[in-house]
């Protein structure tokens, strides 16, 4: 009896469940469809949000790239104007780039005194009178300007030897949390010359009201080398477009060291040609000295007769042309 009742209850429950499923099937199906629609809508919204974020990121990257391109174009135009005045700067700027503090009137006075002194020495040594004006011009114009050019090149060479180390110091200062101004002041007080003087000019320009990028861009006026302009361009771009300053300066330091390494390699490879050119250029003087020591009467007509003097002048001109050609062949710009 109990078993029959249990079976009857079980059958009644199953029947009730089946009836409930039949009547509730449409509602369950509708709820499932609504759930799927809700998931689809959420996925679509998430996809639209991702697409919008991607578009915004692409637009920001494009805007930043355009800003960098505009900055580079502006800097390139300014650099062209600056290069035009840097290739052949006035004598006053050359003296400043050489690190000399002499005034222009005093420089001209020294040039005239040098010309007269050299002419007097040539006259004492017995040089013909018609050659003395040439000696005066060479002593008053050529020799002082050659000295300024020599000092200028030597100062640029010393700057390039120390500049990458100064950039490394600034990179370490920026990475440690110091602002760029403190790194520049550190170089202006602790670095070697002439890097110390150039960075001191940046600090002085800041005190006069200029920003760091503007002061850095003016370094090329007193230091005529592309590396100084590179530094100004990096600072200018970083100030306008943002970015990791320590990484940019670190890359610049590495590029400068690679350029210096390439220059040293080129100089080493061309040293044989330079030695050959030096031997060829010195050979006429060595032969003339040896001939004078062995038989003075044979070579003295070159110095005592007008025909000999003319031969020396023409030979000197042709020899100068040959030396200039050899110098152009063995000097490489890196």
Image (spheres, helix red, strand yellow):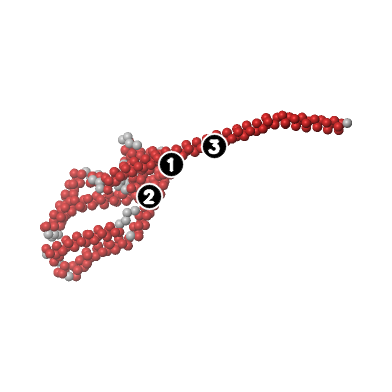
Q: Earlier in the sequence, mark 1 or mark 3?
A: 3
Q: Residue at x 21, y 52 (%)?
A: 143
Q: Give how far apart the Cα atoms at labels 1 and 3 are.
A: 32 Å
Q: Residue 132 shows which numbered tag? A: none
Disc 3 secondary structure class: helix
Q: Which residue is mark 1?
A: 244
Q: What secondary structure is found at the residue carrying circle 1?
A: loop
Which residue in the structure is indicated by mark 2? 256
Residue 47 disc label: 3
Apparent side of residue 157 relative to residue 133 in the rendered image (left or right):
right
Q: Check contact, mark 2 vs mark 1: CB within 8 A.
A: no
Mark 2 or 3 closer to N-term?
3
Position above or below: 271 against 197: below
176 left or right of 10? left
Q: Residue furthest right?
A: 1
Q: Which circle, 2 or 3, is nearer the viewer?
A: 3
Q: Secondary structure at mark 2?
A: helix
């Amino acid at each position: 009896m109990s078993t029959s009742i249990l079976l009857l209850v079980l059958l009644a429950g199953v029947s009730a469940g089946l009836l409930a499923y039949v009547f509730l099937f449409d509602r369950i199906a509708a709820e499932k469809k609504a759930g799927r629609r809700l998931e689809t809508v959420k996925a679509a919204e998430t996809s639209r949000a991702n697409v919008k974020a991607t578009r915004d990121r692409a637009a920001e990257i494009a805007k930043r790239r355009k800003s960098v391109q505009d900055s580079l174009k502006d800097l390139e135009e300014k650099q062209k104007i600056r290069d035009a005045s840097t290739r052949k700067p006035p004598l006053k700027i050359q003296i400043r780039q050489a690190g000399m503090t002499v005034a222009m009137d005093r420089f001209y006075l020294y040039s005239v005194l040098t010309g007269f002194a050299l002419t007097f020495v040539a006259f004492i040594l017995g040089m013909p009178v018609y050659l003395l004006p040439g000696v005066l011009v060479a002593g008053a114009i050529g020799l002082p300007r050659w000295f300024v050019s020599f000092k200028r090149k030597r100062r640029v060479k010393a700057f390039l030897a120390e500049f990458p180390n100064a950039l490394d110091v600034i990179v370490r200062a920026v990475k440690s949390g110091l602002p760029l101004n403190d790194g520049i002041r550190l170089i202006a007080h602790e670095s070697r010359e002439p890097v110390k003087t150039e960075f001191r000019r940046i600090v002085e320009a800041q005190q006069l009201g200029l920003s760091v990028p503007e002061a850095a861009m003016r370094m090329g006026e007193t230091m005529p080398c592309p590396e100084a302009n590179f530094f100004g361009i990096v600072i200018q771009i970083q100030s306008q477009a943002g970015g990791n300053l320590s990484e940019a300066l670190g890359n610049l330091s590495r590029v400068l060291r690679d350029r210096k390494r390439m220059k040293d390699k080129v100089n080493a490879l061309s040293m044989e040609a330079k030695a050959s050119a030096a031997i060829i250029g010195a050979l006429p003087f060595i032969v003339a000295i040896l001939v004078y020591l062995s038989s003075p009467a044979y070579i003295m007509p070159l110095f005592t007769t007008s025909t000999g003097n003319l031969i020396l002048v023409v030979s000197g001109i042709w020899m100068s042309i040959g030396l200039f050609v050899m110098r152009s062949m063995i000097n490489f710009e890196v």
